[in-house]
Amino acid sequence: MAATETARLAVLIDADNASASVVKELLEEVAKYGTATVKRAYGDWTTQNLVGWKEHLHRHAIQPMQQFAYTKGKNSTDSAFIIDAMDLLYAGNVDGFCLVSSDSDFTRLATRMREAGKVVYGLGERKTPEPFIAACDKFIFFEVLKRPSEAALPVQVDGIPDLKELVIHAIKETSRDSGWAALSSVGSFINKNNTSFDPRNYGFNKLSELVRKQTFLEVKETTDTSGFVHLSVRAR
């Protein structure tokens, strides 16, 4: 697919494991990566558990996929979700998938889709098990999608990897003989090795904003038109 083309994305929502309150922000996030040509939410819509979802389904044109819980204690929603995902994969009408869930049961599904050459974005709560997070090309936490009021301080997600350790390691792996590393290379290295990395997890909207606030880094910007930003670990 050419870089100028918009990726067609299938947004598949495990309504049993996703909050309806984040739907608007979730779809806005998806729009950064492509066009949601398929939007489906899975669950037993005859129960009271999913009442909060119903107004959001109509408002955002999300198709509810009914799945009765035939057996107590068995998650039939997961099975319907996975079957539909594989049907979409084989139909070949989408370029990638957005799997909205905090359930580790979708780990193998994400892996299988990536094996087929599809990009996979995961969206879920911070409690999402690491195997599912790692199985996605990129994973976004709900916690950074629901912003407080503009007057409030930026949100920082708890329980995320140590920022200093991540950045210093990336600089060491991507720096040149001069000891400086391009910000773009640092960001690419971190993202490839930590699929849930997101500057918003640390309270910043952009990586460039984040690095400028770190006292352990030296930041140097080029004066030419390239606009490169270089980083180095500040000498003690």
Image: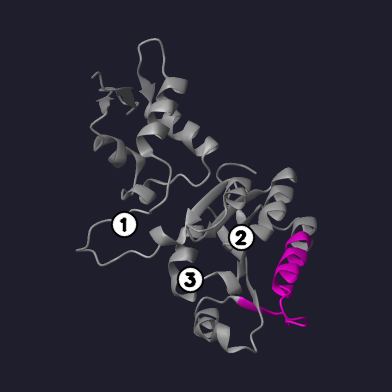
Closer to the N terminus: mark 3 or mark 1?
Answer: 3
Q: Read off the residue under disc 1.
A: 155
Q: Which residue type does callout 2 highlight?
A: Leu
The reply to whether dot 3 and dot 1 touch (C-beta < 8 Å) is no
Q: Which residues are magenta?
A: 63-86
Helix, strand or loop for disc 2: strand
Q: x and y percent of residue 76 in the render?
A: 74, 74
Closer to the N terminus: mark 3 or mark 2?
Answer: 3
Q: CA distance from mark 3 to mark 1?
A: 18 Å
Residue that appears at 47% across and 22% down = 173
Q: x and y percent of residue 206 in the render?
A: 34, 44
Residue that appears at 53% across and 81% down = 53
Q: CA distance from mark 2 to mark 1?
A: 23 Å
**Rendered image: mark on residue 23:** 3
Helix, strand or loop for disc 3: helix
The reply to whether dot 3 and dot 2 touch (C-beta < 8 Å) is no
- The correct choice, above or below, for 171 with respect to 40 in the image is above
Which picture quadrant has residue 57? bottom right
Task: Say left or right for 196 vs 12.
Answer: left
Q: Which residue type does callout 3 highlight?
A: Val
Q: Read off the residue under disc 2.
A: 99
Considering depth in this image, is 128 or 181 the residue closer to the camera?
128
Helix, strand or loop for disc 1: loop
Q: x and y percent of residue 20 in the render?
A: 49, 75
- Disc 3 crowd, CA 10 A, few/some/many (<14, 14-19, 20+): many
- The correct choice, above or below, for 220 with respect to 117 in the image is above
